[in-house]
Amino acid sequence: MAKTKDPFEELRKQPYPLFVAPKAYSFDLNEDMVKMLREEFNADVVSSKLFEAIEGKKKAEIADVAGALFKELGQAWMQKTIQLGEEYSDRTIEIVFESVDRQGNQFMVFPHVPQRFIEIAYLGT
């Protein structure tokens, strides 16, 4: 077999400009945001609310009571996460929004933006 010439060989020899960020970028979640989520939705708080909700209930009622509680808590958790995620943006979500704007492809918003909020929710608690 004949060896094909590497089309990028010449490009690798040429100097290229090094990107220098105009400001220091943070890819970490904001600590205040994480603290707020943990205070409101940590496992101790959720388990205490569950215990209070099912205390004294009959075995047949527990599943319905727990389901209603977790539905309510889940909605509140994601609403708070979305609110805080928009208030405390980081470079990760800024890059997603920049790529959408630069290319004009709004379809890129899904799944990246919802995925980011899910990441914040799970990493924050």
Image (spheres, grey):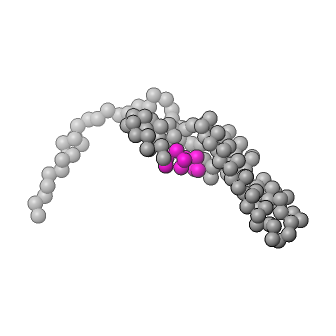
Residue 88 found in image quarter: top right
What's the residue at 76%, 66% (across, down)? 63
Q: Is residue 30 visible?
A: no
Q: Closer to the camera, 33 or 105?
A: 105
What's the residue at 76%, 64% (across, down)? 64
Relative to 105, say whether 111 is above or below: below
**Measured from the top left, where is residue 36 in percent x and y?**
71, 42
Q: Closer to the camera, 60 or 110?
A: 60
**Measured from the top left, where is residue 75 in percent x and y?**
68, 50
Chain part drawn in magenta: 111-119
Image quarter where the N terminus lies is bottom left
Residue 46 within the segment the image draws in magenta: no
Magenta stretch, main secondary structure class: helix
What's the residue at 85%, 58% (across, down)? 52
**Measured from the top left, where is residue 73 in percent x and y?**
72, 52
Residue 108 horizontal side relative to residue 42, left or right: left
What's the residue at 73%, 61% (across, down)? 67
Q: Is residue 101 visible?
A: yes
Q: Closer to the camera, 108 or 47?
A: 108
